[in-house]
Amino acid sequence: MKRYTLLLLSVLLVLGLLLSACAKATPTAAPQPEKTEQPQATEAPATEVQPAKEIVFYNWSEYIDPEIYTLFEKETGIKVVEDNFSSNEELLAKLQGGATGYALIVPSDYTVKIMIDQNMLAPLDQDKIPNLKNLAERFRNLYYDPGNKYCIPYQWGTTGIGYLDGQVDKPESWSVLFDPDPNAPYYGRMTMLDDAREAFAAALIYLGYDANTTDEKQLEEAKQALIRAKAALSGYDSDTYEDLLASGENLMAHGWNGDFLQAQEENENIAYTIPKEGGVIWVDNVCIPATVTPEQKLAAEMFLDFILRPDIGAMISEFNYYATPNKAAEANLDADFLNDPAVYPPQKVLDRLQFIKPVGDAEANYQRMWDEVKAAP
Ligand code: N2P
C-alpha cells in the first residue's frame, strides 16, 4: 500500500514538473525583461501591420494611366503590378478557381453583388480611406454595395456602337449587327465584345426585351440574333477592338464608350453612339478580394485612397475617357470633357439605358447559350 502511495506521489511530481515546463515553453512574441514579479503576458502585443511592398492590380486593359503607379510608388514605396482580364465572367472564374495574390480587382456593379453574396470580397477599413469623402453622393449607396462597405466606384460608362464616321452611316439601330446587310461596307468588318452578358444585353435590347430576362424563349431569340450577327463579324474582342477601328481594319464595333474616345487620339473619325433601342450603363468598382493578407490589404487601401485624390481621379479620366464618380476630381477636368454627351449622356439617353443585373440560376443559361453562339458556324 505504502509503495503505491509513493509511486502515485512520484507520478504526480513528474506530471507537475512536465506541466510547469510546458507553461514556460509557451512562446511570447516579444522578449520580456527578467522581472519575475510581473504578471506574464498571455497575449502577444499587437504588432502594427506594415503595408506590402508590392501588390497586384487585376484590371481591365488600358483602364489606368501607368504614371499613377509611378507616383504612388514614389510616395509610398509600394510597387503596383498590373494584370488584365477581359470580362466580369473571366475575373469571377479566375477568383473562383482559387487564384490568390491579387490585392485589387475591378468588377462591374452586378459582379460586385455576386462576389459579396459569395463572401469573395474583404470589407474595407474606411478609416484608411479618408478620400472616400470625394466620391459623389449618388455613388455611395448603389444597390450592389450600399455605404461602399466593399468597393470604391472607379469609373462609369455605357455600351453602344463605335464606327468610322465618313466610311459608314451612323448606326441608328442595333439592326446593323443583328440583321446585317451583306452588301453594307461594314459587313465582315465589325466586332462584338467577347462578353456573354454584354452580347446578350445588346441582342435583348434590340428585340425590345429586358437586358436581364430569364425567359428562355426570349433568350433563345436573342441567341438566334447573335448567331445572325456572327456572320457579319470579323471576331469577338474586348481589348483591341478600338485599335482595329483606328487603323481602319474594321468599320464598326460593339463596345464601351471610353475605349472609342481613347482611340480618337489616333483616328479622329471614330464616333460613338447608343442606338435608338438603348444600351447598357455600368459602374466599375475597385475592390479587395477576401484572400488578401493584412499587409496586402493595407497597401491596397492606401492605393484606393490615392486614386480617390482629386488630381489622381482626374488623371484616370484624362487617360481612359470614362466618367468619374469622384466629385472632387471634376474641378481638375476640362469643361469639354465634362460636357461631352458621349461621356456624360443626357437624360433622354440615360432613360434608354439598362444595368446588367445578377440573374441567379439563369446565369448558367446565359453561359450555355453564349457557348452555343460561339460554337455556331
Ligand atoms: C476598359 C474597359 C472598360 C470596362 N478598357 C468596361 N466595364
Image (cartoon, rainbow, N blue to C red):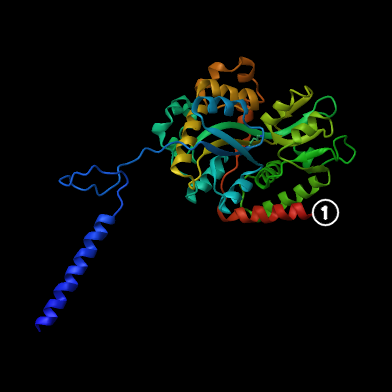
Percent position of residue 35, x then y: 19, 44
Most foreground residue, 261 or 66: 66
What residue do we see at 47% from left, 50% from top? 119
Dot 1 beta carbon under 8 Å from ligand 1:
no
Q: Quadrant of residue 334?
A: top right
- State ligand 1's quadrant: top right
Percent position of residue 28, x then y: 30, 48
Vertical arrangement, residue 357 with respect to residue 367, above or below: above
Most foreground residue, 283 or 10: 10
In the displayed orientation, state which residue is furthest to the right: 183
Disc 1 crowd rating (10 Å Cα; few below 14, some 14-19, many 20+) is few
Percent position of residue 177, x then y: 78, 40
Residue type at the position of mark 1 = Pro
In the picture, measured across the screen, residue 159 lies left or right of residue 123, that is right
In the displayed orientation, state which residue is furthest to the bottom: 1
Can the viewer see residue 12? yes
What residue do we see at 58% from left, 48% from top? 92
Percent position of residue 267, x then y: 78, 24
| Quadrant that contains the N terminus | bottom left
Vertical arrangement, residue 13 with respect to residue 215, above or below: below
What residue do we see at 53% from left, 25% from top? 74
Vertical arrangement, residue 328 with respect to residue 243, above or below: above
Q: Tag 1, which secondary structure?
A: loop
Q: Quadrant of residue 15?
A: bottom left
In the picture, measured across the screen, residue 156 lies left or right of residue 278, that is left
In the picture, measured across the screen, residue 136 lies left or right of residue 235, that is left
**Residue pointed to by mark 1:** 377
Most foreground residue, 134 or 39: 39
Vertical arrangement, residue 303 with respect to residue 193, above or below: above
Most foreground residue, 50 or 179: 50
| Quadrant that contains the C terminus | bottom right
What residue do we see at 68% from left, 45% from top? 195
